[in-house]
Image (spheres, rainbow, N blue to C red):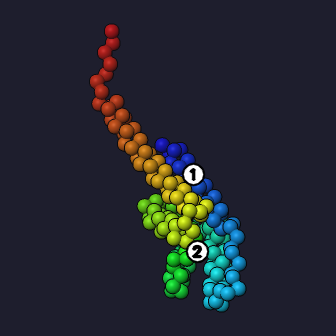
Amino acid sequence: MKKTLAILVVLMFAAAGLALADSQTKAQPAPAKTVEKKKSDLDQHWVEENQKLVALFNDGKIQEAIDKANEMLKYLNEQKLGEGEEAARTYRTLGLLTKVRGQLSSAQPLLEKALSLRQKIAGDSGDTAQAFLDLADLHTLISHAYWFKAQVIGDKIATQQQKEAPPAKKK
């Protein structure tokens, strides 16, 4: 039983780590020359904060990375940019980090928000497909957690039934 739980936890970390690393390695688009200075500064600020977030994750400081992602979302919302590319990436990252913490039900609305933003920003794109895959992976983990709980209950029932069963008759 403990071995199964350990395997599930390792799979959760591996899936979230790979997805987080993949999302962070994508090149940032260069700001267009016609973009306002404020937008350009925001992109640079977001990139710098995102690098700090990734460093926290890589150092195993998951809660600090979650706090950093929440700060980034607050900043984006204050700048009236809570529906843009940076917000979509940050919601995804926050959802993946929350999933790593094992808070699967809390991760779902974050990943759904990332998907919603992706659909608005890019329609049918690779990033939108990845957002669907993130949610599918989350639902797989949730189903495994339920399966594991059912297995534990089944094992308890079987053990109890064995204890209560009358001894076998000898012929």
Residue 59 in the image: above or below residue 8? below
Q: Give the class, few, some or many, for how many residues have Cα within 10 Å of label 1's Cα (few <14, many ≥20).
A: some
Residue 41 in the image: above or below residue 97? below
Which kind of residue does numbered mark 1 sit on? Leu
Residue 105 as seen in the image, left or right of residue 99? left
Residue at horizontal 70 percent and vertical 70 percent from the top? 27
Residue 45 as seen in the image, left or right of residue 101? right
* Depth order, front residue of 65/159: 65
Relative image position of residue 131 (x, y in whole percent)? 54, 61
Question: Where does the C terminus fall, quadrant-wise?
Answer: top left
Can I make out residue 36 in this image? yes
Image quadrant where residue 55 sits? bottom right
Relative image position of residue 85 (x, y in whole percent)? 58, 74
Can I make out residue 98 in this image? no
Residue most toward the bottom?
Answer: 37
Relative image position of residue 82 (x, y in whole percent)? 51, 79
Mark 1 or mark 2: which is in front? 2
Q: Does dot 2 land on a helix, a strand or a loop? A: helix
Contact between marks 1 and 2 (CB within 8 A): the answer is: no
Residue linked to disc 2:
85
Residue at horizontal 68 percent and vertical 81 percent from the top? 31
Residue 110 in the image: above or below residue 146? below
Q: Does dot 1 land on a helix, a strand or a loop? A: helix
Disc number at residue 28?
none
Image quadrant where residue 53 sits? bottom right
Q: Could you give the CA–CA distance between mark 1 and mark 2, rounded to whole angstroms?
A: 28 Å
Residue at horizontal 37 percent and vertical 39 percent from the top? 154
Disc number at residue 11?
1
Q: Give the class, few, some or many, for how many residues have Cα within 10 Å of label 2's Cα (few <14, many ≥20).
A: some
Relative image position of residue 3 (x, y in whole percent)? 53, 44
